[in-house]
Amino acid sequence: MAIIEVKDLCKSFKVPVRKEGRLAAVRNLITFERTLKTAVDCVSFDIERGEMMGYVGPNGAGKSTTIKMLTGILLPTSGEVEVDGLVPHRDRKQLARRIGVVFGQKSQLWWDVPVIESLRLLKEIYRIPTRTYKTNMEMFGELLDLHEFQQTPVRQLSLGQRMRSDLAAALLHNPDILFLDEPMIGVDVVAKERFRTFIRQLNRERQVTVLLTTHDMSDIEKVCESLMIIDHGRIIYDGTIAGIKEQFAHYRELTVDFADGVSEVESDRAELIEREGQRARFRFNRHRVSASELITELAGKYQIKDISVEDTEIEEIVRKIYQRSPSENGPIES
Ligand SMILES: Nc1ncnc2c1ncn2[C@@H]1O[C@H](COP(=O)(O)OP(=O)(O)OP(=O)(O)O)[C@@H](O)[C@H]1O
Ligand SMILES: [Mg+2]
């Protein structure tokens, strides 16, 4: 049974009607008219225990709103949601012991209290056994380099330091599920790499289930096996990362370095898209021809020095999906 089950989940917010035209600014201030804005529009998905799921979408797509419903912070307008057998908004306290949450936009820690004191407070709140606390603090201290700033009040921390403290806080009670909503804003490349490794390790060693929201597609590629894309409150892709390439990236590229003396080159199976010196770049449809067939063809006709095949970057695929209008649902060309 899936650890997270979501069925027809919706969330609408009442927002003021914005008027246009003359004196609009003044009228907007005094209007009491309200309209419904749908942030999450009837989404359904399952996440299996131990799965690492990426959750991406453009700004305002509904990611944070979904996570807030999964963690019990927001009450759904309609639909069903179950996390580890609990209904988040109803069983919020019980759920808190089993989940860890990081909202990159907003710290969960006490603003004026040194990091280490915040963590000690959490130990008391979650009634974390001293042994677990010590083991985890040792592990996080090293992996997240907490030592250098653990005596500093949260409000004096740099963005990246705060994020590292927030992650430690979210993990202190050994949660089974981690909700990470943009947990790496402001984190430098070295810390980021350590962070990714750390999450993978937690998943491998403790079977922690991860739902990760980020705008950095390389986070997703390096951490997750599966991916959901949400746009205008609707899930438009739910599958593996390999699957999205299969479904959306029809073309691949082959770069070939030909031996000196090879002048004109052409292929029956691929389109020549660039030629510079002895290097040529071909584009081919992955559903019609395999890379090895193409290489065999070219190697049969010309002398080749080197060869490399590139997949379309997932970043590129996702960018194209975002750019489509909401009504276009067919596969896109890449
Ligand atoms: N409390 C609220 N009141 C009114 N509207 C809201 C509220 N919270 C979110 N919204 C609206 O709901 C939509 C979805 O917001 P949400 O924060 O879930 O987006 P997101 O996918 O997390 O975007 P981002 O990538 O920018 O974080 C947006 O249009 C937002 O303006
Ligand atoms: Mg958000």
Image (cartoon, grey):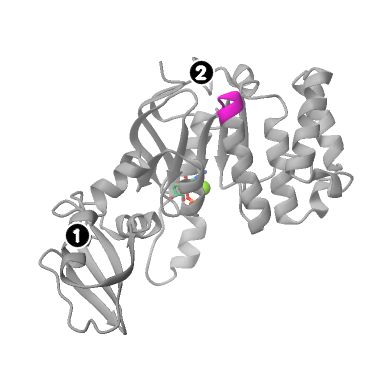
Nearer to the camera, 292 or 324: 292
- 2 or 1: mark nearer the eye: 1
Which numbered disc covers residue 84?
A: 2
Taking the image as shown, residue 160 lies to the left or right of residue 53, namely right
Q: Residues within 10 Å of mark 1 (few under 14, many from 20)?
A: few
Quadrant placement of the C terminus: bottom left
What stretch of residues is rendered in magenta? 204-208
Badge 2 vs badge 1, beta-carbon distance below 8 Å: no
Q: Quadrant of residue 42?
A: top left
- The residue type indicated by label 1 comes to Thr
Residue ID at (28%, 65%): 254
Is 98 drawn above or below residue 65 in the view shown? above
Q: Main secondary structure of the magenta part?
A: helix
**Residue that label 1 marks:** 296
Q: Position of residue 112 (x, y in %)?
A: 84, 45
Q: Position of residue 220 (x, y in %)?
A: 47, 47
Q: Residue at x 46, y 21 (%)?
A: 3
Kindly identify the residue that appears in the image at 39 percent across and 61 percent down.
19
Asked whether residue 306 is drawn in magenta, I would say: no
Can residue 70 be seen from the camera position used here? yes
329 horizontally vs 45: left or right: left
Which secondary structure, mark 1?
Answer: helix
- Amino acid on which disc 2 is placed: Asp
Q: Is mark 1 within 8 Å of ligand 1?
A: no
Q: Is residue 127 left or right of residue 273?
A: right
Mark before the other along the chain sequence, 2 or 1: 2
Crowding near pointer 2: few (<14 within 10 Å), some, many (20+)? some
Residue 321 in the image, given as x and y percentages of width and height: 30, 55
